[in-house]
Image (tube, coloured by chain):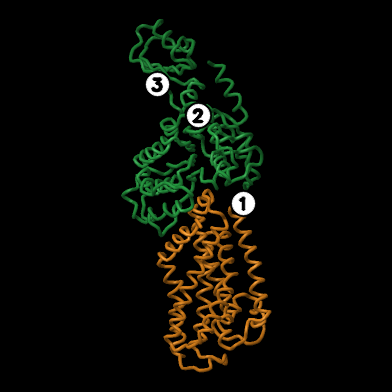
Amino acid sequence: MTSATYTRYELLRTVRERRLMFFGFGFPLVLYFIIAVPNRHMRDFAGSGVTAPLYYMVSLASFGTMMSMVSLGGRIAGEREAGWTRQLRITPLSPRAYLRAKVMTGYTMAAVSLGLLYAAGIALGVSLSAGEWVRTTLLIAVALLPFAALGIGLGHLLTVDSVGPAIGGTVSLLALVSGTWFPITSGFLHDFGQLLPSYWLVQAGRVSIDGHPWGVMGWAVVLGWTVVLVAFAGWAYMRDTGRV
Amino acid sequence: MTGDVQAIRLEGLVKSWRGPSGPVRAVRGIDVTISRGETVALLGPNGAGKSTTIDMILGLARPDAGHVSVFGLAPSEAVKAGLVGGMLQTGALIRGLSVHELVSMVASLYPDPLDIGEVLELAGLEDAAEQRTEKLSGGQTQRARFAVAVVSNPDLLILDEPTVAMDVEGRRAFWVAMRGFASRGKTVMFATHYLDEADTNADRAVLMAHGRVVADGPTTEIKGRVGTRTIRATLPDVAIDELAAIAGVNSAERHGDAVILVCADSDQAIREVLTRYPAARDIEITGAGLEDAFVRLTGEPDDELSAVGAEASSAR
């Protein structure tokens, strides 16, 4: 596969972005310690049935991974501005391989973010069975698909100046209404949140905790949004590159 | 691929863009054929249609009408086969990689790339190989972009105004690199509005204005076509009208004792001048340079462009 080397360099230059490293990985981690440490002895956090360190480990893992994925858009917008996307189009790199490299970069970043949060959780006494760790991780991976597409779409649609606020705003808002910061168990926000893929991303982390699987609703929302956002990303990519 | 296939063949190419005030007819029907191994300058002022033409050759834009083939293939096929390298007009480099890493990254996309060390040497970047792309000077950045364009060892290299915003020294180094690559038997096309660059670095020039080709040929021939070789001489006491009437002279001016004769045929004119006015001294005959040819060919109003060529040929 010719794009393996390409993907490797793509990753290399991503991890060299110090600001990205700091805000992308450091920020959720710092937030986690700020929020979870004072509450670390809370056995039943805000009626959620789980400890505060576990609750927030899952929350910030969702937030961090979602941010990792959508941040793809920021780097893509930067590459477009530099003319790099056009330069790549006059190489044999296929659009498929280009997009695959982007998605893999996003997943790698998300995996690092996830690993750090897991480690932080364990440090604060979170304890899950091997099956629970695996199940949580896999569901998070699936729930990140629509966000990879969202990031790629925004990156090909927006300018480098507008993509930052767009990403920050979107992720913050989604995190808020999806129960990242405090449990939302009823009411309009709960009903509305259930229609968002971010809600199920947060729930993916909680599946292992309270034993409620995604169910039909969860899979339908996540896969539905994946289809919609992949179409959006495809449209934005075509529009940007003028491919017909 | 057989040897007789042309490197580039453009037939009846037309392309309009949607502009803020209606459609912009960027390219209005051009026919150009470029053989293997030629180094061709695509000359023209801003807005002549050079970049649009290049975008179509590279498969970045689709012609509204007409046909493009590159080594007998559709542009996208030629790009996919790794036959074409391009350096686009706008562009910076992506950050976070050293020059060596960046060139390696691009090389990995091709079946049979050049050795990275060889490319860096060709581009004059050996000393900057380990530097991060964001730390390069303007000239080094352009040469790194050149390295990216040639690392695939393409048969056709296309450069869109590669020396824009470079200083004199940077330009010189850049053209040394380009000629080094061209001398490997490669076909090179570069767009420029620096006429001296075309004159020095190309075998042939294709002049574009208002989306059309207004002249195409060896640079010397193009100069001849518009009849601009200049005779300067010190020649007091001769009526300027008399000089202007000499066969081969287009126009004459006097500056004190000196006269300047702009000639369609300077060989014929100088013989006549010396026969009639043996007192003439300090004689200089200079090729007016592509600049004048360029101004005369492209400075005309749009509708008279085709007439200019006819006038120029009949003037000879």
Q: What percent of the width, then of the height, locates residue B291?
A: 46, 29
Foreground: disc 1 or disc 3: 1
Q: What percent of the width, then of the height, locates residue B63?
A: 63, 42
Question: For residue B213, which quarter of the picture?
Answer: top right
Q: Colour of chain A?
A: orange
Q: Which residue is mark 2?
A: B295
Q: Are marks 2 and 1 on the same chain?
A: no
Q: For the residue labelled by badge 1, is the local secondary structure a helix, a strand or a loop? A: loop
Q: Colour of chain B?
A: green
The chain to which mark 1 is attached is A
Q: What percent of the width, then of the height, locates residue A180?
A: 55, 81
**Residue type pointed to by label 1:** Arg
Q: Is residue B131 above or below residue A18?
A: above
Q: Are marks 3 and 2 on the same chain?
A: yes
Question: For residue B237, which quarter of the picture?
Answer: top left
Q: Which residue is mark 3?
A: B286
Q: Residue at x 55, y 35 (%)?
A: B2
Foreground: disc 2 or disc 1: 1
Residue at the left extreme of this rendering: B127
Q: Which residue is mark 1?
A: A243
Q: Residue at x 53, y 35 (%)?
A: B7
The chain to which mark 2 is attached is B
Question: Which numbered circle lies on residue B9?
Answer: none
